[in-house]
């Protein structure tokens, strides 16, 4: 098949569901894979590698489920270079409107001698015969000489020729062990493009692992050398240290269009939602400092930075949070923050306070910031209104009793019965059902506090040495996010207590903001 390519278009080949899913701690059920596949469809990636059909019946089912439902991207399945694997892939991707088989064999000396125990010629013969077989099963064939980076250049060229002659339209050059450097890989792609007969009719692809932390840099360098497909994964997941991170590669190409002069067709505003979807289904939090999608990626705490960003975002931001689908730009209030940031946040909460009032509360704000990592919105409400709660609570509710039931009879749902008490003496008990007992408890807490909360992130860490669970709950209320923390011996108690801490902030805010008298006094 001849592939027509616009030379400025870089295809995004997503392998979250194959290479990513292979990594320990990231395996996904078919339902979980479908959640991620829908996020990839929304991103408008060119190709989704949905799995390795021959690996297990579960993998076959998952690839087929993706092929049945997802439209738009090409659906691809990985196969070793043998007929049985290729047939398994062909059957699994059969329902897809656009389909591809990706087949590979090791070509480096280590792979030939230690793993395959095949000679160079035997491997070349296998490539010719089996890629031809694959081509009879599917029109769109991609071939990878595994461990290409550590393969002798002249032999790599022979392997690539054999695959193209047998009908492969995409030649992927994997850095299987994450060993290359940007200069080296750019040079390799230039060499392959120059020396491959018919190079103009195939797409060269890059697939970099992150063992030395250079997967994104190497992928971008490969593109500079002539690659027009990047194999990557959401949040950079993949074997060992992972693959090239999709959000980083895509945003580098978009933000530095002036330098690369290249385009992808990715809908960048769907990057953050896809990252969150993957994090949710695999139960792996997004690292706070992760480029593009981490909590800190668009957050500023230092006073000088906050002043600059408030004056003009371009002072310290090269991208807009909205461009990657992040809910909002975060000015994190901490001990490094100044009066500009404090005034901006107080204003955003709905208070119309005078300059004088800001001067007034600033010393208390600094004192508070010294004692905690982050000054929350609820802390600010307390500072502005003068409200004070005891026990370190941020709001008026106190937890009195928690009863969770998961072992319910057939046909009934898990439920929770929660009792809470308001500082004004109001004691309320609510029983609620849910998808699980914790979900039910969250619903009951919201009903009691009359706060329309929705859990956005729940992080639980078991601290084995201390024998406690530390929980962080991010709860969305009226388009605002409130973060609650708690530490308990029991995991469920920790989750519910963190949720209550967040809801308490929202309740305090709703009860006091904007303070009428405060507004009146400053108008
Ligand atoms: O890293 C690798 O070599 C692979 C191939 C199967 C493409 O994942
Ligand atoms: Zn790989």
Image: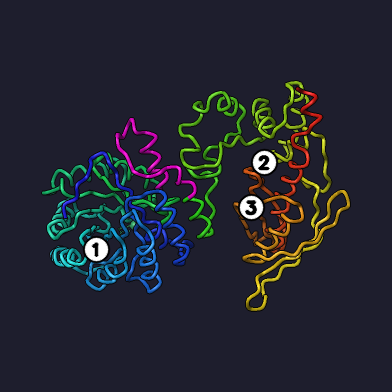
Rendered image quadrant of residue 446: bottom right
Eye-nearest disc, 1 or 3: 3
In the image, the residue with mark 3 has its CB under 8 Å from the nearest atom of ligand 2: no
Magenta span: predominant SS is helix
Q: Position of residue 8 (x, y in %)?
A: 26, 39
Q: Determine if the magenta segment contains residue 256.
A: yes
Secondary structure under tag 3 reads strand
Labels 1 & 3 near each other (Cβ < 8 A): no
Write down the region rendered in magenta: 245-273
Q: Residue 105's mark?
A: 1
Taking the spot 63% from the left edge, 53% from the top edge, the residue there is 455
Q: Position of residue 76 (x, y in %)?
A: 31, 60
Taking the spot 44% from the left edge, 67% from the top edge, the residue there is 30
Taking the spot 39% from the left edge, 62% from the top edge, the residue there is 69
Q: Is residue 104 visible?
A: yes
Q: Give the crowd class for mark 1: few <14, some 14-19, many >=20 residues within 10 Å.
A: many
**Going by the image, does 123 lie left or right of 205?**
left
């Amino acid at each position: 098949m001849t592939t027509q390519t616009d030379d400025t278009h870089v295809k995004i080949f997503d392998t979250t569901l194959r290479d990513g899913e292979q990594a320990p701690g990231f395996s996904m059920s078919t339902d979980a894979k479908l959640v991620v596949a829908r996020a990839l469809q929304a991103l408008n990636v060119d190709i989704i590698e949905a799995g390795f059909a021959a690996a297990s019946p579960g993998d076959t089912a998952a690839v087929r489920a993706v092929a049945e439902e997802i439209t738009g991207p090409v659906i691809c399945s990985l196969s070793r270079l043998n007929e049985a694997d290729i047939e398994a892939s062909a059957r699994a991707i059969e329902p897809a409107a656009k389909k591809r088989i990706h087949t590979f064999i090791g070509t480096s000396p280590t792979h030939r001698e230690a793993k395959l125990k095949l000679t160079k010629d035997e491997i070349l013969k296998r490539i010719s015969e089996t890629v031809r077989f694959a081509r009879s099963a599917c029109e769109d064939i991609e071939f990878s000489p595994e461990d290409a980076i550590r393969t002798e250049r002249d032999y790599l060229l022979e392997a690539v020729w054999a695959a193209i002659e047998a009908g492969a339209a995409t030649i992927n050059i994997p850095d299987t062990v994450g060993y290359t450097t940007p200069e080296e890989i750019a040079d390799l792609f230039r060499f392959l493009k120059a020396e491959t007969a018919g190079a103009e009719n195939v797409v060269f692809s890059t697939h970099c692992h992150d063992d030395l932390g250079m997967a994104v840099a190497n992928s971008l360098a490969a593109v500079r050398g002539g690659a027009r497909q990047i194999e990557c994964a959401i949040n950079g997941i993949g074997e060992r240290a992972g693959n090239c991170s999709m959000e980083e590669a895509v945003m580098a190409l978009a933000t530095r269009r002036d330098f690369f002069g290249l385009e992808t067709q990715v809908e960048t505003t769907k990057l953050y939602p896809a990252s969150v979807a993957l994090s949710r289904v695999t139960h792996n939090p997004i690292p706070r400092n992760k480029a593009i999608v981490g909590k800190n990626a668009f957050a500023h705490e230092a006073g000088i930075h906050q002043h600059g960003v408030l004056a003009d975002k371009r002072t310290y931001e090269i991208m807009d949070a909205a461009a990657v689908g992040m809910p909002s730009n975060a000015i994190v209030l901490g001990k490094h923050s100044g009066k500009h940031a404090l005034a901006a946040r107080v204003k955003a909460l709905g208070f119309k306070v005078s300059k004088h009032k800001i001067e007034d509360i600033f010393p208390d704000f600094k004192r508070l910031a010294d004692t905690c990592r982050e000054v929350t919105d609820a802390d600010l409400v307390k500072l502005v209104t003068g409200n004070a709660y005891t026990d370190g609570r941020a709001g008026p509710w106190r937890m009195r009793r928690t009863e969770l039931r998961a072992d319910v009879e057939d046909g009934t749902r898990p439920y929770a019965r929660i009792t809470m008490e308001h500082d004004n003496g109001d004691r309320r008990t609510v029983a609620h059902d849910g998808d699980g007992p914790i979900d039910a408890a969250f619903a009951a807490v919201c009903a009691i506090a009359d706060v329309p909360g929705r859990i956005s992130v729940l992080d639980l860490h078991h601290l084995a040495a201390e024998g406690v669970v530390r929980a962080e709950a991010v709860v969305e209320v009226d388009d605002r996010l409130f973060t609650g923390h708690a530490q308990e011996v029991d995991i469920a108690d920790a989750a519910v207590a963190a949720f209550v801490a967040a809801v308490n902030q929202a309740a305090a805010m709703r009860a006091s903001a904007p303070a009428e008298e405060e507004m009146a006094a400053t108008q």
